[in-house]
Image (tube, rainbow, N blue to C red):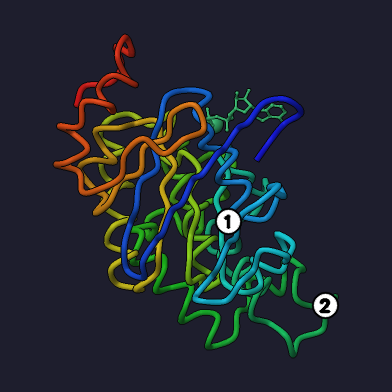
Amino acid sequence: MRFGGIVALSDVSIEVEAGAMVGLVGPNGAGKSTLFAVLSGLLRPKAGRTSLGGDDVTRLSAQRRAQRGLARTFQQPELFLGLTVREHLVLAYRSRHARSRLWSDMFTVGSLRRPDKAEAERVEGLIELLSLGPVADTVVDVLSLGTSRLVEVGRALATSPSVMLLDEPLSGLDAHEAASLAHALRRTVEQEHISALLVEHDVPTVLEHCSKVYVLDFGRMIASGDPGSIRSNPDVRAAYLGDEDVAM
Ligand code: ADP
Ligand code: MG
């Protein structure tokens, strides 16, 4: 992937298996967001291939990839003010599943409050999975950033994805919130048997929760492997040298 004269990604290869939470880390400017955009179909690289569940999706738009089960969360949760947590989840579920309903009926607030049986079942399951019960009927406007991120994750899950791309879901959270969201993510990936790619600045949390970690630096993959091998990798340490935030 090039931006004018800048080679943002070169010779990069990444694989995320079903049921695995895989981490992607690297210093600022390494190319993480660029890779994320390439995978989700927002950027078109000069060369390379993306496949989803064994199908080549290289030529498909971001929207088509989403329809095929690739969900992503945004770094800044973009929630709809005035809607409750439960209404958000019903809305997200309908955006992928509801085919038989009338478009005009599907997304009115009144209709969001009357989910059918299948919708209610999926949504209540997610509320339980993410421990959102206490805030299920709360409007999102008043939620903390940590809880908003849980709602964002729930929304992605409501579309029943096979692969989830998570863009720095832990940023801005305190240590306790970050740990509990990381746990919830891992539990979800295992229970739903989906793949998750976690793009994250918080290296220690990635090393703690991901089964495999990729490390980008200057647009190249300098290391990949289990957390133990990443922790002791001299190239990784060198890439993070001088980055005081990172304790590995
Ligand atoms: P990271 O997310 O790891 O911090 P990025 O993927 O945002 O890194 O950036 C990788 C490189 O590509 C950087 O040198 C950045 O300046 C450059 N870059 C990213 N997006 C653009 C763009 N839209 N136009 C030009 N250069 C870009
Ligand atoms: Mg970035």
The quarter holding residue 119 reads: bottom right
In the rendered view, would you say 36 is above or below 163? Answer: above
Measured as percent of width and height from the top left, residue 168 is found at 46, 38
Of residues 135 and 69, which is closer to you in this image?
Answer: 69
Residue 225 against residue 29 in the figure, above or below: below
* Image position of 121 (left or right of 180): right
**Residue 190 versus residue 247: which sits nearer the camera?**
247
- Estimate the x, y position of residue 131 in percent, counting from the top left: 33, 58
Identify the disc placed on residue 124.
none
- Where residue 133 sits, quadrant-wise, is bottom left
Numbered label tally = 2
Q: Is mark 1 on a helix, strand or loop?
A: loop
Q: Label 1 amino acid?
A: Thr
Residue 84 is labelled as 1
Of the two numbered discs 1 and 2 on the same chain, state the one appearing first in sequence: 1
Side (left or right) of 18 relative to 144: left
**At 58% across and 44% down in the image, what residue appears?**
74
Q: Dot 2: few (<14), some (14–19), or many (≥20) neighbours within 10 Å?
A: few
Quadrant (top left, top right, bottom left, bottom right) of the C terminus? top left
Which residue is at a point 43% across and 73% down the rendered structure image? Answer: 124
Residue type at the position of mark 2? Trp
Select label 1 or label 2 by which is in front.
2
Residue 100: image location, x then y, percent = 74, 90
Q: Mark 2 points at which residue?
A: 103
As drawn, 6 above or below 207: above
How far is disc 1 from disc 2 in space, using C-alphas? 21 Å
